[in-house]
Amino acid sequence: MLMIRIIHSNSVVQFEMLNDYAEEMEELIKSKSTKYLERLKELSNKYSEDEQDDFWYYNRERLTQFHVDYPNLLRSSILISAISELENVLKKIKQELINYSILDPEDFTKKNKEEKGSSIEKTLKIFCDKLSIGLISELDSWNEVRFLIDIRNRVTHSVGQVHPIEQERLYNLLSLMEESDDRTIRLSPYHELIFLENSSTFIINSCLKLLKSITESVLTTVAVSKN
């Protein structure tokens, strides 16, 4: 299946470009935040010692914007872009399998009507069921990507908030991650998602690992079925 290999290779390039962008973005976040803080310090010198507390209190929201809000917005855009790319490449692989009559389009229509879940999860379940490549839970990196899809949904549908009751599973998982030294995403005291500096690398690598796993499984299964 040459086209599936080409689709996979092209998607890897897209993820590499996204990673390059993410690295440049982190450098920009650091430099701009530092410059802004320096400007505020220079400005604060114009005020007396008695006025310093009022000055910094007034600018506390601006500091939060530069150090938390703006970086969070940029990093969440990496998540949305990565999940969208993964969705698109799986759709292309699915279409190739349909074009070669390896899969029936009715399988996807039925799955979309009967089951809940993301388009990625539904597509992977069809691949696993119809191509006999095992259970979706056994796929490398699926749990990581499932976690990221849940995070993406909170960003797009709930302004980045995770309700401890309505999204109990995700909330508990994020709470457990608080104890980890290598956590990439955490919750604020107000249950808002905070993307840490290393989140983009985790997001992109998780998507790449799952894509590699499913592509290799599909190609191997198709090759065996032809023999």
Image (cartoon, helix red, strand yellow):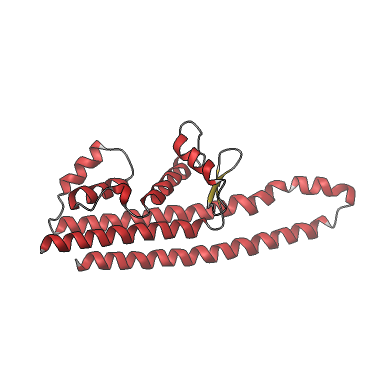
Viewer-side residue, 116 vs 63: 116
- Which residue is most to the top? 165
**Residue 151 seen in render:** yes
Q: Based on the displayed image, in which of its 4 quarters is residue 13 positioned? A: bottom left
Query: Is 205 on the left-hand or right-hand side of 96?
Result: right
The spot of residue 19 in percent (x, y) is 46, 64
Query: Is 96 on the left-hand or right-hand side of 117?
Result: left
- Which residue is most to the left? 227
- Quadrant in the picture for the C terminus: bottom left
Q: Based on the displayed image, in which of its 4 quarters is residue 6 positioned? A: bottom left
In the image, what residue occupies the spot 75% across and 45% down? 58
**Residue 120 seen in render:** no
Query: Is 152 on the left-hand or right-hand side of 66?
Result: left
The spot of residue 38 in percent (x, y) is 74, 61
The spot of residue 165 in percent (x, y) is 48, 31
- Quadrant in the picture for the N terminus: bottom left
